[in-house]
Amino acid sequence: MRIPASPFHGGGESVVINPATGQSIGAVGLADLAETDAAIERAHAAFPAWRAVAPGERARLLREFAAAIDAHVDELAALEVANSGHTIGNAVWEAENVRNVLTYYSAAPERHFGLQIPVPGGVDVTFHEPLGVVGVIVPWNFPMPIAGWGFAPALAAGNTVVLKPAELTPLTAMRIGELARDAGLPEGVFTVIPGKGRVVGERFVTNPLVRKVCFTGSTDVGKGIMRGCADQVKRVTLELGGKSANIVFEDADLELAAATAPGSAFDNAGQDCCARSRILVQESVYERFLELLRPAVADFRVTDPSDDAAQMGPLISAHQKASVEAYLADADVAFSGQAGTGGDGFWVAPSVVLPRTLTDPVWTQEIFGPVVAVMPFRDEADAIAKANDTEYGLSGSIFTRDLGRGLRMARAVDSGNLSINSHSSVRYWTPFGGFKQSGLGRELGPDAPNSFSEVKNVFISTES
């Protein structure tokens, strides 16, 4: 497996660890402040020519970029398995998602329509003008898809992009940067800058040449980025934490709800802001649901992530493993599943916990690990109150055979993305984002290029 080369070295090197084994797989050069500024300046210099590229030509280049990703899906997936511990099935899907997102937004340059608005005495039209340089800060939990969700619509709208991957998981972003150049994107249009958050990420916030920052990560860091961007009235999109509820009513298909609950909570080892990490079950079926959930958790396959049968791999780091284990040590664990093994890898068994109160940390805090908390509720009002009793509002699920109840609950739960009788959260052609402290703005869907544009209004007099 080839480790992509970094052109940056002023910030030293970072050792890349395989989380399944705990062993090093290489080192990556990191950018320092001067190298970061130079990369931003190159992106700024490339912006006028990129925004002037004819819409059809920009669309063609994005399709070429998508084709380059498609030709290297297996390579990108193998890098993600080794660097992030993702299961091979997930990693293939993630690489294909980048391809699909690029393909979807390759249609945007020719369809980024303005409006003609009726006015007296002339013609009024609007234009979507690109912002300039966009800084995209990517987390370690989904390095490929979240990168694509930022850079694809930004490029389609005519912006240039500088992207900082997470220090723990830089490899796939670096390889995607190489493929962008191979596909013919002009120099400076799309740049990947490995580096530390307090150096590269912070400079995206403070450098005035960067006109928008897209950040996915913790709520606390997101708040700091928002405060920093306010100094320059800089545009910002934030996708932050989650503590999503999976609400199961007594009339639901309990077998389906129990069988699908482990995947909704433990996919990517629970390192997912959309994870349904709280399960609310109506009192009358609470015990039966737990009986059905136990074998589903026991059968959840935690093994070598390169194994095609794997459903869950390791946590990303020793630090994350210790954090999750600290939560479990102070919780009432009802039952656990398989614990994968692999040298000194960062493995934790998926676990079901029963909170003692509504203030238990396992119920209120984003654990970001394979832990799901289960609690009973009385009726719709109680379920709504408990589901909304959180600072977050990103995702969630509702299981019921009563369509009216499902829609009532979907309207009442304070969350940006909800599913009825399923756990679907993210489709690249529908909007994604959170309520409350889960974020600001929306990604994906047909309107995403608008968030990387300014609306300009032009009036043309017909009376002079």
Image (tube, rainbow, N blue to C red):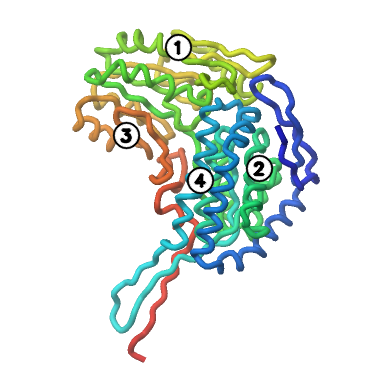
Q: Is residue 181 above or below residue 338?
A: below
Q: Is residue 211 above or below residue 97?
A: below
Label located before the other in sequence (2 or 4):
4
**Left-right relation of 1 to 274:** right
Q: Amino acid at mark 2?
A: Arg
**Which residue is located at x 61 percent, y 20 percent?**
321
Q: Give the residue number, with chain letter if any, for mark 4.
A: 149
Label located before the other in sequence (3 or 2):
2
Q: Give the residue number, with chain letter if any, for mark 3.
A: 413
Check contact, mark 3 vs mark 1: CB within 8 A: no
Q: Amino acid at mark 1?
A: Asp
Q: Give the residue number, with chain letter if any, for mark 2.
A: 175
Q: Give the residue number, with chain letter if any, for mark 1.
A: 299
Quadrant of res 322? top right
Label located before the other in sequence (3 or 4):
4
Residue 224 versus residue 148: which sits nearer the camera?
Answer: 148
Neighbor class of circle 4 (other Cα within 10 Å; few <14, some 14-19, many 20+) is many
Mark closer to the observer (3, 1): 1
Question: Could you tell me which secondary element the residue under label 4 belongs to?
Answer: helix
Question: Could you tell me which secondary element the residue under label 1 belongs to?
Answer: loop
Check contact, mark 3 vs mark 4: CB within 8 A: no
Mark closer to the observer (2, 4): 2
Q: CA distance from mark 3 to mark 1?
A: 31 Å
Q: Which mark is residue 61?
A: none
Mark closer to the observer (3, 2): 2
Neighbor class of circle 2 (other Cα within 10 Å; few <14, some 14-19, many 20+) is many
Task: Quadrant for the N terminus, please.
Answer: top right
Mark closer to the observer (1, 4): 1
Question: Could you tell me which secondary element the residue under label 3 belongs to?
Answer: loop
